[in-house]
Amino acid sequence: MKILFVVADPRPLFLPDSASRASARLPALCLELQRAGHEVSIVSPYHAPSLANVASGSGSGGGVGRAGAGKIKPTGVTISFPLGARSDVAVETWEVRAPQGLQVFLLKSAGYFEGPDAPIAEHDLAAGALFAKAVVELTRRLNPAPDVVQAHDWPGALALVLLRAARLPFSTTLVLPADLRAQGSFPVEDFNLLNLGWEWFTPAGMEFYGRLNCLKAGIVVADALVADGEGDRRAVQTPAGGGGLDAVLREHAGRLHGIIDGLDEAAWNPSTDKLLPRKYRPAALGGKRTSANVFLASLGLKKAPVGPVFTLTRPAVDGTAPLEGLEQLAPILNEILNDDARLIVAGGPAPDPSAAPERALALAAKRFPEKVALVRDPADLDERFERSLLAAADFTLVLGRGRGVGAGVLRALRYGVVPIVPAGTGLETLVDDYRPGANGAGVHGHALYYYSPTTDALVDTVFGRARPLVAEQPVRWEALRQHAMARAGKFNWARTAAEYSALYAKLRGQ
């Protein structure tokens, strides 16, 4: 099957170390689909800074454009499009072959996408519209034509709309962006840039509360919508997780699928992680205790607690995502910390000191300075910190029901961290509730569930299940951590690519 990826930001392809983690899915997914036998192509704006690395052979290690990539070359095809009142805006088509065989088309247009800034900004409908129009024309010229066109952002969603307007017979898939606030929303006056008939500007099409909304329009026209796993599929249909589009996504829920992004097993591996003080693996977990003590000391916390090391972190969406579940945790902070436990709270937006949960957290940190660490400055939350935190933690408190928790859960499992999660969030597809085997032999499950979104239910799980495992049941505790680490390995990119392949086949009636 021939699949064309429409990507408005090429940096994850050529500079994955500098791109957002939310976009890092693209190289891995494309490569695994190629390995599965599909013919994969990518179309993206020409972006000079990232492509310079490919031309010099110094591309970053995780992308398709790393050292050894083919030479970037013009195809000789230049296409002109109307853009609002302008009748002939030119777009050049360039091409590069990645070492793994992926074909990457690069669209270049002076004044729109070829410079040092991000290729298509959130506020730049002219660039987004020109890119979408060029994508449509490229699909007309590809031979063989694509079977599936898959878009990953609001300019890509706009391309799906223009494909539908042109009546081109491709199956279309829209992958919902990690940040649903990036919708491509513009005043109605800008609609003329699309050169579409006004029959498209309706509540059933591109209009959303009196504005043009490109992402909403893509949701309406796409044959399939994809969220990052079942948890996100449920969360985007709620006001808290839908970015204002939750009602639209509920209306089109029949086409909304949850496919979890894979875990890069080579990149997230405590047995090879050079950023840890001491590496470890499931059969030899001693290095985890050593790494934990080093990290706790670096935060000013007392080492070697008898009880668990708990973490509460923001979802893996963006740096401003809130700390979910703090209101459940705040009433029992003293109870947890009077025990010999540790709590590390990382990330989230700037604390609101007037909020009761934040006041409780600040007071706990003041009262128990050797047991509580609050790390809220984004500048401190680099990759070394995240890996060290995973190596130090026993349990991660996944207390909310919002977006972005699946990726964090997989990384936690990989490093032997057991999630404490509320039931009914969709994480059941990732982790089962723990129960020991008969007579203490064997282990089932990978997480500790609590079945009511209340503080009392959380107390029962923390003190009735988590604390006894760490402090009193070392054999069962080690078996559970080993089981959790093995579970993470089942959610690799090959599995993700297989689920996408099944979706494509369903769309094509195969």
Image (cartoon, rainbow, N blue to C red):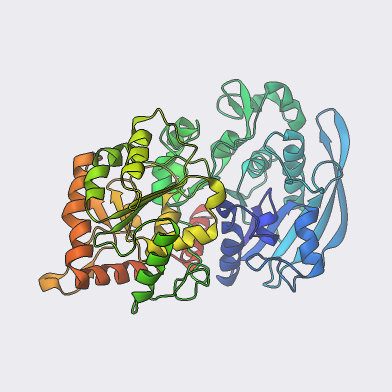
Relative placement, left or right, of 138 versus 327 is right
Q: Quadrant of residue 4?
A: bottom right
Residue 457: where, in percent of width, then height?
A: 20, 44
Tally the numbered discs.
Answer: 0
Q: Quadrant of residue 279?
A: bottom left
Vertical position of residue 230 compared to residue 52: above or below: above
Residue 448: where, in percent of width, then height?
A: 25, 56
Is there any visible trace of residue 414 in the rendered image? no
Residue 328: where, in percent of width, then height?
A: 28, 39
Residue 140: where, in percent of width, then height?
A: 75, 51
Is there any visible trace of residue 441 in the rendered image? yes
Relative placement, left or right, of 105 versus 29 is right
> Which residue is painted at 47% across and 46% down in the image?
347
Relative placement, left or right, of 159 versus 349 is right
223 vs 347, nearest the viewer: 347
238 vs 77, nearest the viewer: 238
For the N terminus, the image quarter is bottom right
Identity of the residue furthest to the bottom in this view: 283
Identity of the residue furthest to the left in this view: 439
Relative placement, left or right, of 403 versus 151 is left
Vertical position of residue 96 compared to residue 459: above or below: below
Q: Quadrant of residue 419?
A: bottom left
390 vs 18, nearest the viewer: 390
